[in-house]
Amino acid sequence: MKLKIFNAVNSKAIPTGEITLRINKSAGLLAFSKATTDFF
């Protein structure tokens, strides 16, 4: 599976309430949006 690298050039704003997961590999951080936690 090939992963896509997201940056400021190819990313767009995420609407409020959207289910998202953000990964910061340099900090080893996984961040879930509030909508994601409310989903489960």
Image (spheres, helix red, strand yellow):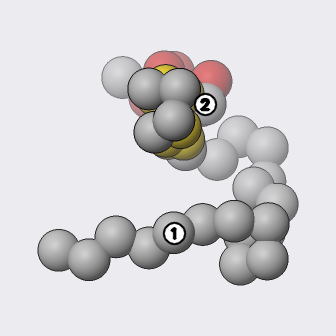
Task: Identify the residue position indicated by label 2 in the image.
Answer: 33
Q: Which residue is more in the foreground, 13 or 9?
A: 9
Q: Residues within 10 Å of mark 1 (few under 14, many from 20)?
A: few
Quick check: can you spot residue 2?
yes
Percent position of residue 26, x then y: 51, 35
- Indicate left or right for 13 with 32 as reference: right
Q: Residue at x 44, y 73 (%)?
A: 4
| Nearer-the-camera pick, 14 or 35 | 14
| Residue depicted at 36% across the width and 23% down the height | 40
In the figure, is residue 21 to the left or right of 40?
right
- Residue found farthest to the left: 1
Is the N terminus in the top left, top right, bottom left or bottom right quadrant? bottom left
Which amino acid, by three-letter code, is at mark 1?
Answer: Ile
Crowding around mark 2 (Cα neighbors within 10 Å: few <14, some 14 to 19, many 20+) is: some
x and y percentages locating residue 19 in the rendered image: 55, 43
Q: Position of residue 13 (x, y in %)?
A: 82, 60
* Comes first in the chain, label 2 or label 1: 1
Task: Say if residue 32 shows up in the picture.
Answer: no
> Residue 5's mark?
1
Q: Assign a secondary structure to mark 1.
A: loop
Q: Specify the amino acid type for callout 2.
A: Ser
